Image: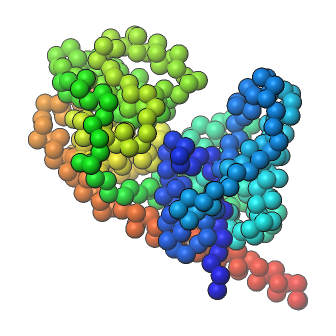
Amino acid sequence: MKSQRVCITTLEFPPDIGGVGESVHRIAQMLLDMGYQVHVAVFRAIFRTEREKASAGEYRRPSCQTTEQNGIMVHRLQPAIRTTRAKEQDYLCDLYSQLKHLHQQYQFDLFHAFFINETGFLTTLLAKENAIPVINSIRGADLHKHIFSPQYHGQITWTLNNSAWTTFVSQDLMDRARVLAPGIRAKSSAFWNSIAPIEFNNLPMPTLADQLHGTVIGSVGSFRDKKGLEYLLDACQQLQLDTDITLLLVGDFVEKERGYWEQELRNSGVIDRVLITGRISRQEALAYLPHMDIFAIPSLHDGCPNAMLEAMLAARAIVGTKVDAIGEILEDGVDALVVNPCSSEELTIALRRLMKHPTLRQQLGLAARNKALHQLAPTVEQQNWRRVYQHALGAAKAEVTKVASISLA
């Protein structure tokens, strides 16, 4: 019996930097280990680069670059650039045609889309037109932010309703989706990301290590509206009045919000205590974790952030917020301190408590590491994906049998 072919659609995949790409890579490897033939189609449904090239007179044909990465076939799709007056639908139509061509070439048995408003609608439309099951995986911002866009609301709800199965990285996300599309209740599930063990002792000394002093409070990510960084700056403003601290931001601000965050830094009163690494590789970002005394993740909403799981593996004392998987995974006073989002006061109290009690930091950090090693192990997530794929493919087979029996009757 031939192995079944799966096509995952995603907006990023390594070497692209980003949490979605890391998750897709991890899941693709799991599916490969389960015996599936795995293809990954990478494309963006936001066309800033295309518009910039068009304005500069740089035109191109649509293209698909295919490579093999450790047994996974990776197809990077790009729409044509033909005119400065192109609209989103022109680019999306090109991408749809390329994805359709890939299906004609490889005859996929199942599609699986990550990030519903960029890849989900296009993927689900193609799957439904070809009577192929489609899984949609909700990662966070798609239902926390983009659902409020009149442009995306309709296609998000349509995509939810037409999925063979939908997965979520937190119960909060699944609850919202079930309000928007009650019919998915019997064909949806929520489970966390996993994290493979990391040997932190083998990582190189990070670039800014010699500039860290006092108690190091760190955070990792692509810093944007959802990260709650304003409240961390407020807390550090209070803490630096009586304690030597460094606020280490591993990552950088998203470009479209850079002006806002630079203003917040100037007004924070702690700009001389802040170190920002800029965009760096995942390996260098991991190398900073052992140099942090406290890992802060004061998000307003955040799916199931890989950065937090990495901090847990590094046995860091964590202060997180009661949102999404952060509040589901972390248990206050057991393996972290958990506070309400948007509360500078609660964040300040929690950070000060950890700064004053090194033993508590060590205790919470070790408990967090133990939870990551056991409850967030890749084998746990792999079993979840095994069940999801069995559900989706089984439902499709049952539908084919039903249609065949009706035709015979």
What percent of the width, then of the height, locates residue 333? 22, 45
Q: Is residue 318 left or right of residue 182?
A: left
Q: Residue 59 is drawn in which quadrant?
A: top right
**Foreground residue, 242 or 245?**
245
Q: Is residue 201 left or right of residue 124?
A: left
Please identify the residue farthest to the bottom as the structure is shown.
409
Q: Is residue 186 left or right of residue 385?
A: right
Quadrant where the C terminus is found in the figure: bottom right
Identify which residue is drawn at 75% across, 70% down: 107
**Is there any visible trace of residue 77 in the rendered image?**
yes
Q: Is residue 119 left or right of residue 216?
A: right
Identify which residue is drawn at 77% across, 23% down: 56
Identify which residue is drawn at 81% across, 25% down: 57
Identify which residue is drawn at 75% across, 28% down: 53
Quadrant where the N terminus is found in the figure: bottom right
> Does 357 appear above or below 176?
above
